[in-house]
Amino acid sequence: MTLVTDPARETVIRKKRRRDLLIASLSTVVVFGAAVVVILQSPGWPAVKESFLNPVDARRAFPSLVDGFWLTLKLFLTAEPVVLLVALLIAVLRGLTAPILAPLRIVATLYTDIVRGIPTILLIFLFGFGIPALNLQGVTNEPLFWGWAALVVSYSAYVSEVFRAGLESVHPSQAAAARALGLNRYQGLRHVVLPQATRRVIPPLLNDFISLQKDTALVSFLGPIELMSAAAIYANSKFNYTPYIVASLFFILLTVPMTRYADWIAARQRQRSQSSGAGL
């Protein structure tokens, strides 16, 4: 089907877009310009600049912040795939309907309800201090490991609900069609239901992983020197808070690309759904 466009209408739309872009640009410049002027003219600006934006302290703290950043990145990148696997398993277990599998469904439900009710920082304390105190044979007492494990346990409970929502959003007719093609329940789940559910939950999954990336800073309460603890050590020794600003820039470097990617995925899904609706 070929769409017929009106040249006059297209011209009006282009003019409106240029006008809207100009208005948005001018309003942005005015608002942010006024904010900058207010900040720079405030009486306490010189003291704030010295305490939070000192380039000398930023340069001195930078090597230790880089080391802490690599630990933060390591925690995040190793926890993320494990969270995905555990969360997907929990979501699948919660969707089981066979009576004989009721114990698994109950355990998965209790896991989700209990873990989501406990603050992440409390889980980190319980894992990092409680488990090593048991002196279990053959079990590591490394604080970094147990902080990582606490993050995995905490976020797998939240992410499992995202997966479960995605699984429930797939129409039952898809599973019925898979069975009609000769696929068993497991094959239908793997090849038909899961791919559709996963595509639908990518944006909220990315939002959860953005939170996970920031919550790696909580592991510092157990002793490992990651990005935020490295900034705190310098700030407490030099009485200057510039390293906190530098540390926040490191987090932004990780967070902003993931946020924009999540927005792009969501926009693409909206376009696909609108195209599908237009084609009906």
Image: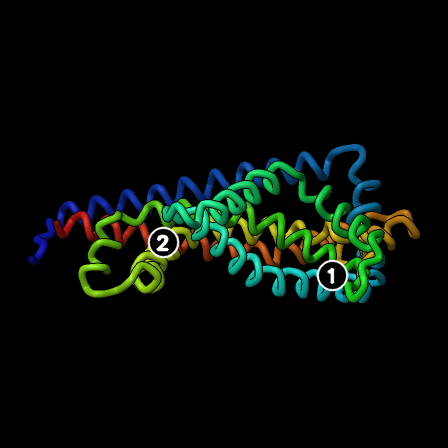
Quarter occupied by residue 37: top right
Residue 128 at x, y percent in the picture: 78, 52
The Cα–Cα distance between marks 2 and 1, rounded to whole angstroms, is 31 Å
Q: Is residue 1 above or below residue 26?
A: below
Q: How is the image coloured?
A: rainbow
Task: Name the side, left or right, on which 36 lies relative to 163.
Answer: right
Residue at 63% of width from left, 60% of height from top?
76
Which label number is shown at residue 145?
Answer: 1
- Please tell me how crowded label 2 is: few (under 14), some (14-19), or many (20+) other residues with Cα within 10 Å: many
- In the picture as drawn, the residue positioned furthest to the right comes out as 237
Closer to the camera in the image, 40 or 3: 3
Quarter holding the N terminus is bottom left
- Give the residue type that dot 1 points to: Phe
- Please tell me how crowded label 1 is: few (under 14), some (14-19), or many (20+) other residues with Cα within 10 Å: some
Which label number is shown at residue 197?
Answer: 2
Q: Identify the element where label 2 is drawn.
A: helix
Q: Is residue 77 above or below residue 162?
A: below
Closer to the camera in the image, 19 or 139: 139
- Give the residue type that dot 2 points to: Ala
Residue at 31% of width from left, 46% of height from top?
17
Task: Name the side, left or right, on which 232 lies relative to 208.
Answer: right
Can residue 56 be seen here? yes
The tag earlier along the polypeptide, 2 or 1, is 1
Residue 161 at x, y percent in the picture: 47, 45
Q: Identify the element where label 1 is drawn.
A: helix
Residue at 31% of width from left, 59% of height from top?
185
